[in-house]
Image: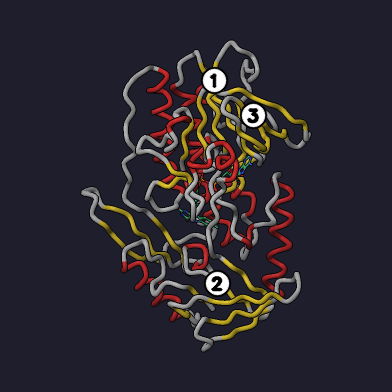
Amino acid sequence: MSRAGLRNSNPNMHDKSNVIVLGGSYAGARAARVLAKELPSSHRVILIEKNSHMQHLYVLPRYLLLSGHDHKAFIPYNDLFTEFSHNSAEVIQARVDRITPTHIEITRLPSDTTDRIPYSHLIYALGSHLPSPLKGMHEEIVGSMKWMEEYRKKVSNARDIILVGGGALGIRDIAEIFPDKRLLPKYDPKMHELIYDRLRRLNVDVVAGQRVTITREGDGDAGTVTTADGRVSASGDLLITCTGQKYNSSLLSSLSPSSVHPSNDSVLVRDTLQLADEIFSNVYAVGDVADTGAPKTGNAGYWQAETAARNVIRSIREEAMVPYVMTPPIIKVSVGLRYRVTQQPDENGAVRVWDDEEGRDDLDAHLMWPLFGAKAVDILNG
Ligand SMILES: Cc1cc2nc3c(=O)[nH]c(=O)nc-3n(C[C@H](O)[C@H](O)[C@H](O)COP(=O)(O)OP(=O)(O)OC[C@H]3O[C@@H](n4cnc5c(N)ncnc54)[C@H](O)[C@@H]3O)c2cc1C
């Protein structure tokens, strides 16, 4: 798939101006769909994404342990714009190499041909670099599924698995070491209490409030983890690190160095989600990569994308823009196959945290498909 949803569109033709969205995940795809639905006919939307499909990250840690569901994690882009057929919209499978003040430079995949596309507005949604357990994912579905199968073999052959990092990814599904005194420190303390209690009951050794030194044995998967106070040192033949989120902002730092946070590399934005750098008022950033104060979740990125896309449309119509308003945090964490803990606001916005045993093996991956215009019928029927 290189041009899903292609419609009367040549991005280098000057009949329309291009609104380009970079990155087709939870945030970017939402922005692209809002634009496809509502852009005036003077503009077309182009989504640039290096993968042939959306990678549903939430379910991947589980699927790396449990076989039979991999195909549900990869959502094709073929129908991303189908329901907005009146508008000009296109997905280009390509890697973005450079952003200039007027163009983007890309390498189309899988052909490896290079191209330049002009833009009138740009939404930057390139997220974070994948955590190390997921580094082997491919740009095509078949390659990713093969890699997942190989990874599952490693997990089942490993005798001692050590997982470092107490965020949502670290907790999921597998001794546990994390630097904060509390798991998920950005969420309600009851989330920590319920998850911690469950991990203890599953005989998971939880080492809290410690930074660690990691020593790898050569280039392999084995390694040793030692806590800063030296009291805990553990070796494992499969050491998985789920620490240190790295924002994918380097392409923007070349365009506008002052837009990138000097210490954590997130992208500095105004409340309208335009870059803080006023020279580039036609460039917006959303999702994980944007410094909005919101938690780094797909849900927060989705709503930022909605705001940025609507502000692009407002700017084209010369209307006043609206600020991004942070939505209350929502998270669902599974510990084991059935048990899960959820934080979600009630109808008055008050924090609610509860646990249940209703989790499904595939973590209800099909619920994500319609958000990308895709029908989940095939995966539900096996
Ligand atoms: C394993 C895991 C599990 C998670 N579970 C949950 C959960 O249960 N609930 C929750 O709310 N959040 C969860 N999160 C966090 C959530 O996934 C992120 O907040 C979310 O992915 C951010 O979305 P995004 O669109 O900003 O960026 P990303 O999802 O990081 O997407 C960036 C996109 O840009 C593309 N891209 C990157 N560089 C280039 C380039 N040069 N050219 C072209 N394309 C490029 C990538 O392929 C990708 O599609 C999880 C994260 C991980 C890693």
Residue 198: name its quadrant.
bottom left
Q: Secondary structure at mark 2?
A: strand
The residue singled out by tag 3 in the image is 4
Q: Secondary structure at mark 3?
A: loop
Determine crowd level at label 1: few under 14, some 14-19, many 20+ residues with C-alpha closer than 10 A: many
In the image, is 146 to the left or to the right of 227?
right
The percent position of residue 340, horizontal first and vertical second, equals: 42, 64
Q: Look at label 2 and name its amino acid.
A: Val
Q: Is residue 267 visible?
A: yes
- What's the residue at 47%, 80% (across, down)? 207
Q: Is residue 4 above or below residue 347?
A: above
Along the viewing direction, whichever of 30 and 117 lies nearer the viewer: 117
Q: Is residue 158 visible?
A: no
Question: Are the residues flagged by discs 1 and 3 in contact, CB closer than 8 Å?
Answer: no
Residue 183: name its quadrant.
bottom left
Q: Secondary structure at mark 1?
A: strand
Q: Is residue 306 above or below residue 41?
A: below
Residue 77 numbered mark, or none: none
Q: Is mark 1 within 8 Å of ligand 1?
A: no
State how far apart marks 2 and 1 are (Cα). 44 Å
Lower sequence index among marks 1 and 3: 3
The residue singled out by tag 1 in the image is 44
Lower sequence index among marks 2 and 1: 1
- What's the residue at 53%, 42% (across, down)? 257
